[in-house]
Amino acid sequence: MDKKTADRTAERSMLITILALAWPTMLEQLMQTAVQYIDTAMVGTLGTQATAAVGSTGTVNWLIGSTISAVGVGFLSYIAKAYGANDQAAAKRAVAQAVLLTCILGVFFTVLTVSLSGMIPVWMQVETGIRKMASAYFMILYLPMLPRTASIIFGTVLRAAGDTKSPMKIGLLVNLVNVAFNFLLIYPSRQITVFSLHFNIWGAGLGVVGAAAASAVAFTIGGVCITCVLWRHKMISPRGQKFTPDMQILKPCMQVAFPNMLQRFGTSLGYVAFAAMINSLGEVSTAAHTIANTVESAFYIPGYGMQTAAATLAGNACGARDGKRMKRLASVFIPLELVLMAGSGACLFLAAPALMRLFSIQEGVISLGTAVLRMVAVSEPFYGFSIIIEGFMLGMGKTRAPFAFNIIGMWIVRIAGTYICTQLLGLGLVAAWACMIAHNLLLFGLFLICYVRGIWYPLLTRAYTPQT
């Protein structure tokens, strides 16, 4: 077999591995997005105020969730490298430390979010008439913060070991439970007709509070299930390990996690500031922004599904000190990601009006949401490239450059630009989303430079030695 044929065979084998890792994550995210769609549509039937109350504090969810996810990234990098180096003992010790931090963070964020639930809508500049509704929704949603933290961190730990199917299956269960309880808790008792047969369906009629309660129940079930799966897992169960702090593992994990945590915290805080400025534009802009965000999230699924696979495989290659495999990963991942995101963007551009009509009957909301969705659709391939390069770097533990890139883009381009456009010049939602797109294009430029200069590729400069 000549070299070219061997390379093609290796690339085909790698493509199969990539897709095997990526598709469960994509399906999981697709189901999560489908439930977001259903949630938004169900709440949307209650009126614009209900939609605005639910969406107005949504960016705080990103702030908290992304901070916890950053801790998961630290463990992902460590565990993926340990598996690449065939050091299963180090991987299991890292999982035990992940359990310890999950308990600490879960309790901390429960106390923090519940105690601040009354103030969050005020800080987010939510209109006075819906603040009480938004506060109740937020508090109920964050009561099960410990199982939510377990779902995030333990899901990342399982993916780091190459198990993407278990988090997917649990995600499907969580989504089904959420929809079922939404159906029962949001609406009052009613009669439905199926094939000329009439059924009386019980309903609590709790509205927005019912939507929050349904999500809380689903999150709790998901956290319990993923904890059981991790505990019984053949490869990475923490049974028999010590659950006291182990600085030999926590230190390298936190060295990776801390810049990523600052990045996620800084960018999520930027999302909060961004949403607060949009909330100040009125109910129509808030509703259009909330729905457009929900719609757009489905079209990022190919990107973020592939990023998970990129991080895991890059960590394996780094742990194995296999530079050739790392370069081949880039040659397969990047074209595949660009094709997927270009197709995703084209679908979003064409389907934007129909998708907006799924969630709103107000023409003003539909028209405004369609305009901003078509704007962002054009930038999808550029953002997809950034996602993949960042995934490589996260898997190999290089989190400082992504931190700097994202903070610069968020605060200098998106937030400052949106403030100037909406607060000083009196422009609306279209101008704010234009600033968001400019942020995405800046990230593309910075990660392209990073890729061309080889900053993403640490194997030539240092080795990974698992701590034992």
Image: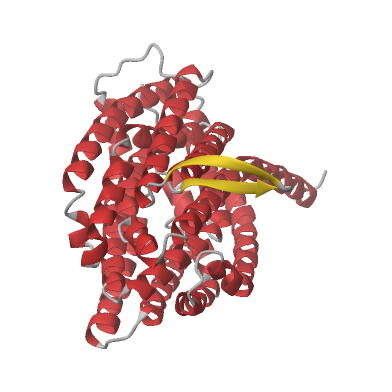
Q: Residue 440 or 86: which is nearer the viewer? A: 440
Q: Is residue 156 visible?
A: yes
Query: In the image, is 327 to the left or to the right of 134?
Result: right
**Which of the image's four quarters has the C terminus?**
top left
Determine whether 20 is above or below 63 in the image: above
Using the image, determine if residue 377 lies above or below residue 181: below
Res. 322 in view: no
Residue at the bottom extreme of this rendering: 425
Looking at the image, residue 410 lies above or below residue 237: below
Residue for point 34% across, 53% down: 62
Residue 438, picture quadrant: bottom left
Q: Residue furthest right?
A: 1
Q: Which one is in front, 417 or 450?
A: 417
Q: Residue 146 location, x and y as percent? A: 31, 32
- Which of 239/177 is in front? 177
The residue sitting at 41% across, 37% down in the picture is 219
In the depicted view, which residue is nearer to us: 120 or 313? 120
Specify how the rendered protein is coloured: secondary structure
Picture residue at 47% right of the left edge, 45% below the top: 182
Question: In the rendered picture of this protein, how many numbered marks are placed on residues?
Answer: 0
Across and down, in percent, residue 89 comes to 43, 19
Q: Position of residue 300 (x, y in %)?
A: 53, 59
Residue lying at the far top in this picture: please name it: 240
Q: Quadrant of the N terminus?
A: top right
Q: Position of residue 273 (x, y in %)?
A: 25, 66
